[in-house]
Image (tube, coloured by chain):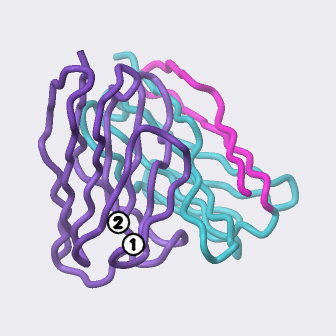
Chain colours: A purple, B cyan
């Protein structure tokens, strides 16, 4: 069966520090991968998605970047965190780009102080 | 691109009553409409979905209806229980072939015992 792992579960980082969140998927090949951010009381904002190794689409301009070094690995990064980067970050995968079930990780609660 | 509006943002019901959450979408070519449930501190999970070739789908206490002419779809939960308390998200697939799911902003449902 397929599983998605996301870590760390919680993270407290100072302003200006770098960020690296990792997501891996097991049990499937060539998944479509996504990073979402959920601010307190807000909806799911799509940040990046990837349809293959090295292919990254950005939905909103921001202080973050994403990379997909391997088929089932998706990384969210920042060189210098801002206070506004605080939020709940979710990784997800699907078999096709939009019209099938999305499987979400457990999320990372990031607090920038 | 696709735009999904979800109402209400919060909903409180007495245990045993029904709850209805409504969403509208903008892309008349959309053909896939899932609903996700997010419990506190976790990632969203698919609870039911509907495709554009049907008008209604039921799964025990949960049902989804779709009105393609009006471009809206609704989630119905009957005989609500405290464990139904969560944030619910609707989503639509824009059918452009190369864009991911677009989510609504979510509804926080509270079932009062």
Q: Residue at x 16, y 24 (%)?
A: A12
Q: Residue at x 43, y 66 (%)?
A: A56
x and y percent of residue B76 in the render? 57, 43
Q: Residues within 10 Å of mark 1 (few under 14, many from 20)?
A: many
Range of magenta residues: B1-27
Q: Nearer the viewer, residue B92 or A77?
A: A77
Q: Nearer the viewer, residue B2 or A82?
A: A82
Q: Nearer the viewer, residue A3 or A45?
A: A45
x and y percent of residue A8 in the render? 12, 42
The answer to which of marks 1 and 2 sits earlier in the sequence is: 1
Identify the element where label 2 is drawn: strand
Answer with left or right where residue B100 lies relative to residue A102.
Answer: right
Q: Which mark is residue A32?
A: 1
Q: Nearer the viewer, residue B72 or A83?
A: A83
Which residue occupies the extreme bottom position in the image?
A29
Task: Indicate whether B47 appears above or below A101.
Answer: above
On whether residue B7 falls in the magenta region, the answer is: yes
Q: Residue at x 15, y 58 (%)?
A: A5
Chain containing mark 1:
A
x and y percent of residue B81 in the render? 35, 31
Chain containing mark 2:
A
Q: Which residue is mark 2?
A: A93
Point out the image quarter for the N terminus of chain A. bottom left
Q: Are marks 1 and 2 in contact (CB under 8 Å)?
A: yes
Total residue callouts = 2
Q: Residue at x 47, y 58 (%)?
A: B48
């Amino acid at each position: 069966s397929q599983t998605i792992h996301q870590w760390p579960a919680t993270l407290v980082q100072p302003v200006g520090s770098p960020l690296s969140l990792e997501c891996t998927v097991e049990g499937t090949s060539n998944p479509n991968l996504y990073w979402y951010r959920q601010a307190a009381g807000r909806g799911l904002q799509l940040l990046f998605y990837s349809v293959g190794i090295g292919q990254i689409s950005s939905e909103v301009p921001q202080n973050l970047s994403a990379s997909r070094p391997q088929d089932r690995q998706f990384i969210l990064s920042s060189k210098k965190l801002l206070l506004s980067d605080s939020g709940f970050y979710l990784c997800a995968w699907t078999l096709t780009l939009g019209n099938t079930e999305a499987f979400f990780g457990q999320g990372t609660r990031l607090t920038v102080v | 691109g696709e735009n999904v509006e979800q109402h209400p943002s919060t909903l409180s019901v007495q245990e045993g009553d029904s709850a209805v959450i409504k969403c509208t979408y903008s892309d008349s070519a959309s053909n896939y409409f899932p609903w996700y449930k997010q419990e506190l501190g976790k990632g969203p999970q698919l609870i039911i979905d509907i495709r554009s070739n049907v008008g209604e789908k039921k799964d025990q206490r949960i049902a989804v209806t779709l009105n393609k002419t009006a471009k809206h779809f609704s989630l119905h939960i009957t005989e609500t229980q405290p464990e139904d308390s969560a944030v619910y998200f609707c989503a639509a697939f824009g059918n452009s072939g190369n864009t991911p799911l677009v989510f609504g902003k979510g509804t926080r449902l509270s079932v009062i015992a």
